[in-house]
């Protein structure tokens, strides 16, 4: 039933958008930043997909980040995380 898959996809999309909005509201102040962007990452597929509107809206400056190929982006995220963790020890 393709209709059910479409409905399920739309519900998932709406829930992700709501989660992204709430995440941004809750994290901007504690992280002392201007924006928070949400990506979904798959380690097994070695890919990342932008979720946040600031990353997917072509009129947003953040959309340039989303144009990186997912393998490079996943590697950059991983390397940045490792560097951040290493600098705190």
Image (cartoon, rainbow, N blue to C red):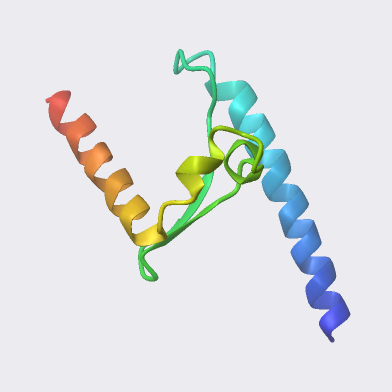
Seen in the picture, residue 55 relative to 31 is either above or below; the reply is: below
Seen in the picture, residue 85 relative to 2 is either above or below; the reply is: above
**Percent x, y of residue 35:** 54, 24
**Percent x, y of residue 8:** 78, 67
| Residue in the image at 84% along x and 68% along y | 7
- State the image quarter where residue 89 is shown: top left
| Residue in the image at 72% along x and 58% along y | 12
| Residue in the image at 48% along x and 51% along y | 67
| Residue in the image at 75% along x and 65% along y | 9
Q: How many marks?
A: 0
Q: Farthest residue to the front: give it.
A: 59
Seen in the picture, residue 4 relative to 1 is either above or below; the reply is: above
**Percent x, y of residue 68:** 41, 52
Between 68 and 86, the one nearer to me in the picture = 68
69 sits to left or right of 49 = left
56 sits to left or right of 3 = left
On the rendered image, what quadrant is the N terminus found in? Answer: bottom right
51 sits to left or right of 2 = left
- State the image quarter where residue 88 is shown: top left
Between 3 and 58, the one nearer to me in the picture = 58
**Percent x, y of residue 36:** 53, 29
- State the image quarter where residue 45 is shown: bottom left
């Amino acid at each position: 039933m393709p209709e059910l898959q479409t409905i399920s996809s739309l519900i998932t999309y709406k829930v992700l958008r709501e989660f992204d909005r709430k995440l941004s509201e809750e994290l901007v102040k504690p992280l002392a930043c201007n924006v928070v962007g949400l990506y979904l990452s798959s380690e097994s597929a070695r890919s990342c997909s932008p979720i946040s509107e600031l990353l997917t809206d072509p009129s947003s400056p953040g959309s340039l980040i989303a144009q990186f190929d997912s393998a490079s982006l996943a590697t950059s995220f991983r390397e940045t995380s490792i560097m951040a963790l290493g600098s705190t020890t």
